[in-house]
Amino acid sequence: MIKLALHWQILIGMVLGIAFGFLVAGTDWGPDFVRDWIKPIGTIFINLLKLIAIPLIIASLLKGISDLKDISKFSAIGGRTILIYICTTVIAVSIGLLVVNIIQPGDSVSQETLAELTNAYSEEGSMRVEKALSQKTKGPLQFIVDMVPQNIFGAASNNGNMLQVIFFTIFFGIALLLIDPEKSAPVKAFFDGFNDIILKMVDLIMIIAPYAVFALLASLIIDTQNPDLFKALSYYALSVVIGLICMIGFYLLVMAFYVKKSPLWFIKGISPAQLLAFSTSSSAATLPVTMERVEEHLGVEKEVTSFVCPVGATINMDGTSLYQAIAAVFIAQALAFDLTFADQLTIIMTATLASIGSAAVPGAGMIMLVIVLEAIGLPAEKLAIGLALIFAVDRPLDMCRTVVNVTGDATVAMIVGKSVGKLGDPNVKNWDDNYEMVK
Ligand code: ASP
C-alpha cells in the first residue's frame, strides 16, 4: 500500500478540517457536534505536545551538552546562536516596516469600519492592554532575573518557564562536563536512554497529527465570528502575509547561499513542523516536532539542535516581530497618528525586544504589541482602539506568523550547525516507519 509522507497527511487533514468546518458551520447541529466530539481530539494532541516539551528539553539538552565533551564548544554555539537570533529578528522587523510603508494599509480603513471594529472588539482590546501593562512594570534586567529559578520543580511545572528549565539544565550539563568522567558516565548513560524514550514518545504522538489538525481547524472555523470584518482588514492582513513570505524567502536565500542546501529540500524537511505551527499557533507546542525534523531530516547534530531549537522557540520570533512592526504602523496610520523616522527606529528596537518577550503560545504577539505602541507614544485611549481594530484577523495571522517563527528557528539551527561543522547527512528515520511499526 502506498504510504503518504507525514506532511501530506497533515495537509490533507488541514484541508478536510477547514472544509468540514465550513460545511457544518451553518447547520443547527454542526457547531455543538464539533465542539463536543471533534475539538477534544485537537486539545488532547496539543496537551500531549506540551506534556512532552519540558522532558524533551531536559533530555536533549543534557545529551547534547554531554556529547560536547568540552565547555569551550558549548560557549561557541551559545554566543553565535543568540547573535544570529537577534540579527534575524532585526531583519524581520525591517522587512515588516518596508512592506507596511509601501502598501500603507492603514489609509484604506474608512471611518465607519473603524467605528464598527472598535465597537465589536473594544473589550478584547482593553483586556490585552491590561495584560501587557502588568508585564511592563518590571525593571530592565528583570528578564534575566526571571531566567534563574528558585526551585527547579516549580519551574518545570509550568511550560511558560521554559527558559528557567533551560537555565537549570545547562547549569547541570556544564557541571556534568566538569566532574570526573568515571562519575559522570552513569548519568550520561541514563540521559541517553531517557532521550531515546522521549523521542519515541514524540513519534507516537505524531501518529494522530493528521486527525488532530483536522479537529483543530474544524473547531477554529466554527469558533470564528464575524467573517465580514475580515474584508475590511484585508490590506493589513495582506501586508503581514507579504512580509512573512519575504521572510521565508530570506531564509531560503540563506539556505541556498550560506548553508549550501537546496531550499526545496529544506522546506520538505521542515514542512510537518510548519503545518503544525499553522494548526496550533504555538511554537512551544510545535517544539518537539521542530527538533526532530531539524535533527533527523535536516541533519543538524544534536549538540546544536538541543540548544538552538528550545531557546529559539522562546526567544526567536521573527514572524511575531515582523507582524508587530506592521501592526504598529497600520494602527498609527488608521488612527491618523503621525510617525517620524525616529519612531520607526523605535519600532525596530521595541518590536525586537517585544518578540523576545512574547510567550510561544497563541495570541502572545498581540499582547506584547502594546509595548511597541506605547514606545511610539500612542495615547492610552487609542491603544485599546488600535488593538480592537486588528483583533478580527489576529488568529489567522497568528497561524501564519507562527510558521515563520518555527522556520526561523530551523534556519538558525542550520546556520549554526554549518558554522560549527555540525551539519551532517540527515539520518532519515521515517515517521512512516514508526507508524508501520506501531501498527
Ligand atoms: N503564536 C506565536 C508563537 O507561538 C506567538 C505570537 O506571535 O503570538 O510563536
Image (cartoon, helix red, strand yellow):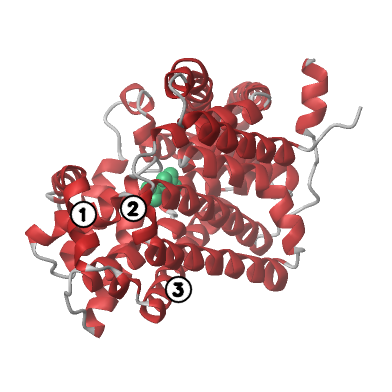
Image quadrant for the C terminus? top right
Which residue is the extreme one toward the right? 1
Is 201 placed left or right of 151 in the picture?
right
| Mark 2: secondary structure | helix
* Label 2 to label 1: alpha-carbon separation: 9 Å
Query: Which residue is at a point 54% across and 58% down the rendered structure image?
Result: 76
Say what amino acid the circle numbered 3 marks.
Answer: Ile
Q: Nearer the viewer, residue 362 or 240?
A: 240
Say what amino acid the circle numbered 1 marks.
Answer: Glu
| Residue highlighted by disc 1 | 116
Q: How many marks?
A: 3
Q: Nearer the viewer, residue 150 or 17?
A: 17
Disc 3 within 8 angstroms of ligand 1 (CB) = no
Image spot of residue 409 (x, y percent): 54, 53
Q: Which mark is residue 229?
A: 2
Compared with 185, 419 (above or below) is below
Image spot of residue 332 (x, y percent): 22, 70
| Mark 1: secondary structure | helix
Query: Which residue is at a point 52% across and 36% down the rendered structure image?
Result: 22
Disc 1 within 8 angstroms of ligand 1 (CB) = no
Which residue is the extreme one toward the front? 27
Mark 3 or mark 1: whose residue is earlier in sequence: 3
Q: Which mark is residue 95?
A: 3
* Label 2 to label 3: alpha-carbon separation: 26 Å
Q: Nearer the viewer, residue 245 or 200?
A: 245
* Label 3 to label 1: alpha-carbon separation: 30 Å
Mark 2 or mark 1: whose residue is earlier in sequence: 1
